[in-house]
Image (cartoon, rainbow, N blue to C red):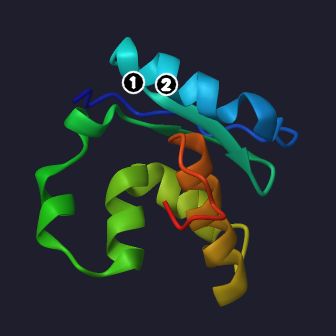
Amino acid sequence: MSTSKKTVKKTENAKPDTAAADAAKAEALEQPVIFEHRGLTFELPHPLDMPLELLETDDEVEAVRLMLGDEQWQAYKATKPRVRDFGALVDAISEAQGGDDESGN
């Protein structure tokens, strides 16, 4: 995993119809997945490059914080999200990783 800081940029919302294809391509090439949410661009590492601590937690908030890393988590929190907004972030992460938010994946 890279130790360099990642820049979180403000952006428009991504088109959801390409999210699954982009996620599959990124995973096949072992690249990070990039997605947009709440005007920010986030970068998730390849699943095999996620922090090991992710496997040690059952706490959804902690899991998302670990996946995003400290800098991106702080940028997200700076948007002053509410509890309902966190659910939308989880959905955006799932979609970016190729999950179907209707099936709970």
- Residue at left 64%, top 88%? 83
- Residue at left 53%, top 29%? 23
Give the quadrant of residue 38: bottom right
Q: Is residue 29 left or right of residue 24?
A: left
Mark 1 residue crowding within 10 angstroms, few (<14) / some (14–19) / many (20+): some
Q: Which type of secondary structure does the marked residue at label 1 adopt? A: helix
Give the quadrant of residue 21: top right
Q: Which type of secondary structure does the marked residue at label 2 adopt? A: helix
What x and y, as percent, mark residue 73?
49, 60
- Residue at left 64%, top 39%? 35
Label 1 to label 2: alpha-carbon separation: 5 Å
Q: Say which amino acid is labelled 1.
A: Glu
Say if 28 sits above or below 103 in the image: above
Q: Residue furthest top?
A: 29
Q: Say which amino acid is labelled 2.
A: Ala
Say if 36 sits above or below 92 in the image: above
Q: Which residue is mark 2?
A: 24
Residues under numbered marks 1 and 2 in contact, where contact means CB atoms less than 8 Å apart: yes
Quadrant holding the N terminus: top left
